Amino acid sequence: MRQGDCVADYTPTPEDRFAFGMWTIGHPGRDPFGDSTRPAIDPVDYVKGLADIGAWGVSFHDDDLMTFGAPESERRAQLDRFKKALDETGIVCSMATTNLFWHPLFKDGAFTSNDRDVRRYAIAKSMRNLDVAAELGAPTYVFWGGREGVETAASKEPQDALERYREALDFLAGYVKDKGYAIRFAIEPKPNEPRGDTFLPTVGHALAFIETLDNSEMVGLNPEVAHETMAGLSFYQGVAQALWQGKLFHIDLNDQKIGRYDQDLRFGSEGIKDDFFLVRLLENSGYAGPKHFDARPYRNEAGDGIWDFARGCMRTYLILKEKAKQFDANPRVKQAFADAGVPELAQPTVGPYSTASADALLSEKFDPETLASRGYRNEQLDQLVIDTILGA
């Protein structure tokens, strides 16, 4: 693609801080209606493959790296192989999380199971993997409550479930602080699937919940494109609020069709306009965390196709990053911003309250008809967005 006289380079480098989960490129193609369509990738080969395509980081669940239920000596050997691959390639461990959803014991939940022993086991499993995360240098630990929810409302008292959820995160935060680990927590909201209704279903629910925690300063968000889109919400707006509240600790990039099951599509493959604004927001905000792709290759891909998927995620992000720069530098866009009053929104409306400022506001004369007559020229502004994305 040619930009003026220059050829744009969309080759990713580690400086872009692109990361992939072990379960993404390596997803075997299994779905609720069919078994795997491609072989698993050895974790060492996975890390080497990420290095070959210019990625920066890798994330993992405990069970991605170490065989569930295996003897500790075997698990230690598996972890050491992975550590060696990280050292040899320069790929960093950007995030870690616990698998609290796959094993049948979690069928009623993990932190919010009605079985107290299951809840205790889930916390202990998380503690053990926090030790691994600290050993690998992961700065962020994500909590996705995939099984924290209900199919029948009568099965759990929601206030009790939220109390148990809070108890678990408070306990685990205490463990991290006691151990001196440099790890922050990030909650990943999702409205449904695999549970019919999930606790902490959206960015807003999670932000409110975080404020109730004993160590709320060390807990933020890991929002995912697909999850907010499943609920018909604007992911862009949700991320903006998380940034505004200083709670965007991590982000999962993928794509999704509204109203569908969780698709985890290649980033930029569906909601391209929303993705444009998301990338522009992340780049302009100074967000310095991982750009983490939590997506999967199409089920009918194999071999080189799964790495094409990974390259596509990163390439599209870099294209949209370049488009965002073009948009912000365009004089016509700047004029359209002015016509729409965009810069005015950054100006304080009344400032801090005082008796004098309140009296002054009440004495001010407004003409509602004049205010109502203003146009905001949003059509021309939105068309400039489309022109930029389409390269017109």
Image (cartoon, rainbow, N blue to C red):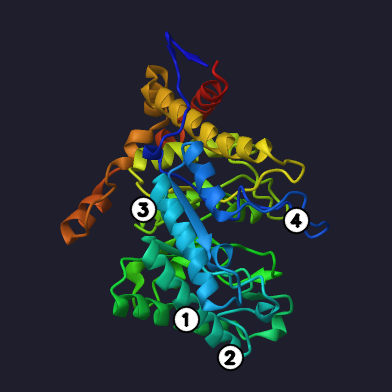
Compared to residue 373, the image places residue 355 above or below, namely: below
Q: How far apart are marks 2 and 1 (CA)?
A: 13 Å
Q: Which amino acid does label 3 sit on?
A: Trp
Q: Earlier in the sequence, mark 2 or mark 1?
A: 2
Image point (54%, 25%), residue name: 389
Percent x, y of residue 31: 76, 56
Residue where numbered disc 2 is placed: 117
Q: How far apart are marks 1 and 4 (CA)?
A: 31 Å
Q: Which of marks 1 and 3 is nearer the N terminus?
A: 1
Percent x, y of residue 135: 37, 66
392 with respect to 192 (left or right)? left
Q: Which mark is residue 30?
A: 4
- Residue nearest the observer in this picture, 255 or 57: 57
Compared to residue 67, the image places residue 106 above or below, namely: below
Q: How far apart are marks 3 and 4 (CA)?
A: 38 Å
Q: How far apart are marks 2 and 3 (CA)?
A: 39 Å
Instruction: Tell me whether the residue at label 4 lies in contact with that at label 2, contact meaning CB atoms closer than 8 angstroms.
Output: no
Compared to residue 147, the image places residue 281 above or below, namely: above
Q: Which amino acid does label 1 sit on?
A: Ala
User: Mark 1: which secondary structure?
Assistant: helix
Is residue 162 in sight in this rendering?
no
User: Mark 3: which secondary structure?
Assistant: helix
- Residue nearest the observer in this picture, 215 or 177: 177
Percent x, y of residue 333: 42, 23
Q: Which of marks 3 and 4 is nearer the N terminus?
A: 4
Q: Earlier in the sequence, mark 1 or mark 4?
A: 4
